Each structure stands twice: as C-alpha cells, then as structure tokens.
Amino acid sequence: MGRKRSLDKILSSEYVSISELVELSGVRYSTIKYYTEEAMISFEQEDTRLTRRYPRELALKRLEEIRLMKEVEGLTIKQIKEKLCLG
C-alpha cells in the first residue's frame, strides 16, 4: 500500500481511492463498498487487480443523494436504485 496522501492532494484530485472517499464523506468503508457492488457509485479500474478509482466530485454527490433519499425520504436501497434508474 502506498503512502497516505494529504487532504489537500485528495481535494485537488480528480479521482480518489475508496479509503479517501471514506475520509471525505464520513460514510463507512463497508457502505461505500456495498454501494459500489450494487452499481450505485461509479468507478474506474484498469485491471481486475488494480485499485478502484472513484471520480471524487461525482462520488461525493452520489453519496449525498443516497443519504438524503434514505434519511429524508425514507427510501429503501431497492427504491433508491429504482429512483437512480439502476433497478
């Protein structure tokens, strides 16, 4: 594993790792991993063995959308996926 990047570097990066996304969003690692597996958050991956890279701004926006749908609207994951046109 490489050295941890500074918050300034993370905030200026177009792409971030899942651990950096956790740091920026406050959302648990397991939750982001689940959302990724459910195709609710997009990522890029050059090869199956390489780290997933999340587009920072889009991923943070999507995590906030999901949070609002869960907490404010009271939607289930299935309903959120349908609303996001994924289900």
Image (cartoon, rainbow, N blue to C red):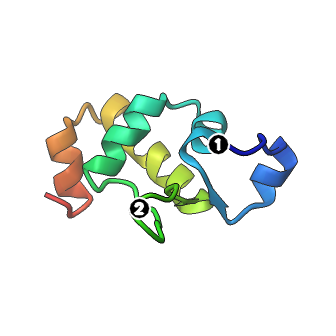
What residue would you read off at disc 2? Answer: 42
Q: Quadrant of residue 41?
A: bottom left
Graded by Cα atoms within 10 Å as few (under 14), some (14 to 19) or many (20 or more), the crowding at tag 1 reads many
Label of residue 45 in the image = none
Q: How many marks?
A: 2
Identify which residue, 11 or 43, lies in the foreground: 43
Query: Is 61 positioned to the left or the right of 78 in the image?
Result: right
Looking at the figure, which quarter contains the N terminus? Answer: top right
Query: Is 54 positioned to the left or the right of 83 in the image?
Result: right
The residue at the point 66 percent across, 39 percent down is 24
- Pointer 2 or 1: first along the chain: 1
The residue at the point 16 percent across, 55 percent down is 82
Identify which residue, 18 or 85, lies in the foreground: 18
Graded by Cα atoms within 10 Å as few (under 14), some (14 to 19) or many (20 or more), the crowding at tag 2 reads some
**Secondary-structure class at tag 1:** helix
Tell me the amino acid under the disc marked 1: Glu
What residue would you read off at disc 1? Answer: 20
Query: Is 24 positioned to the left or the right of 31 in the image?
Result: right
Looking at the figure, which quarter contains the C terminus? Answer: bottom left
Tell me the amino acid under the disc marked 2: Ser
